[in-house]
Image: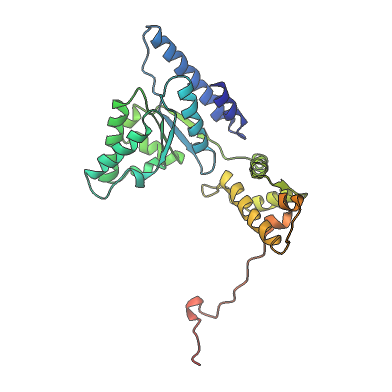
Amino acid sequence: MEEWLAELDELVGLAGVKSEIRRQTAILRVDALRTKAGLKSPTITRHLIFTGNPGTGKTTVARLVAGIYRAIGLLSKGQLVEVDRSELVAGYLGQTAMKTAEVVGKAIGGVLFIDEAYSLNGDQYGEEAINTLVKEMEDNRNDLVVIVAGYPGPMSTFISQNPGLASRFRTEIEFQDYSDEELEQIFTQMAAKADYDLGEGCLAEFSRQLAFQVRDETFGNGRFARNVLEAAIGQHAWRLREVSEPSLEQLRVLLPEDLAGDPAPVVAWPAGGEAAAEVSPA
C-alpha cells in the first residue's frame, strides 16, 4: 500500500486529491479490519466521483486507487477498466444491458472508470446502461469499485437524477486545474521520462505558449504539456534530418525552436473564400 501511496504523492500538484484518497484509504482499511474482527460495520460506499477539467490526472489517480484498494484487500485483482458511453450502450434496447454487464464483468476485482458518465443521461439506451450498472454494482459490491468522472455541473445532475446512483456515490473528489508552475514541472518530467533534455530557453518558450492558452473547460492541462512535447520531438527529428551521425547530446537535447516549430503557412484565398477558387481551363 505504501508503494502505491508513494506513487500518488509523486504526482505534481493535486494536494486535495491526495489528501482525500489517503482519507478514503484509511476509512476503508479500518472498516475491513473491523469486519474481519467480527465487529459491526456501517454502510460505507467505496465508489467515487471525480470532477474536473480534462488532463487533470483523473485516469492516473483511478489507476492508483485500483492498486491501493487491492493492497488493502478490498479488491482481488486491482485492474483498471476505462470506458465511455460508446462501450456501454448498444444499438438497440436489450443489447445495451448485455454490453454493460460484459464490461462490468471485465472490471470485477478492480476499478471500472467511466469517463464523461453524464453522457448516459437523456435517452432510454443510456438509462438501460445505468440501471444495469446499478444492479451489477449491487451484485458485485464486495469486489468492484466504480469511479465516474466528468465536468462538475453535469456530474451533479447525472448522480441526482438516479436514486440508485445517488445512494452509491457519496464521495466527490475535485481535480483542480494545474498552475503554470505545475504544468512546467509536468512538462519537464515528461521530457525526462522520454530521455530528452530541455535546452536553455525551452521552459521560457513553453511558458510563452502557455500564456496564450484560454484556461476554460477546453484547456487540456497535462494534455497541453504532452502535446507541446510531442510536437517538439517531431520538430527535433526534422531538425536532425540531414545529420547523418548525430551525437548523443544532439539526440537528447530539445531547443526552444523545437517547441516553437515553423510558423504556419499563410494562405491567401481569393475573394469569396475557398469555394471561390476555381481551376481555369487550359
Q: Quadrant of residue 113?
A: top left
Is 195 in front, or is 49?
195
Q: Nearer the viewer, residue 6 or 274?
A: 6
The image shows residue 233 at horizontal and vertical percentages of 65, 54
Q: How many marks?
A: 0
Most extreme residue toward the top is 38
Q: Position of residue 213 (x, y in %)?
A: 61, 52
Q: Is residue 154 above or below residue 237?
A: above
- Along the viewing direction, whichever of 134 and 169 lies nearer the viewer: 134
On screen, 280 above or below 256? below
Pick out the residue farthest to the right. Answer: 200
- Residue at image point 51% right, 93% down: 282
**Is residue 158 toward the left or the right of residue 260 in the image?**
left
Percent coordinates x, y for residue 180 in the rendering:
66, 43
- The residue positioned farthest toward the front in the image shown: 245
Rendering quarter of residue 18: top right
User: How has the structure been colored for display?
Assistant: rainbow
Relative to 274, say whether 190 is above or below.
above
| Residue 278 appears in the rendering | yes
Kindly tell me whether residue 163 is visible in this rendering: no
Please provide percent x and percent y for residue 25: 49, 21
Query: Most extreme residue toward the bottom, as rendered?
Result: 282
At 54% from the left and 30% from the top, the residue drawn is 17
* Relative to 179, 257 lies left or right: right
Q: Residue at x 57, y 21 (%)?
A: 2
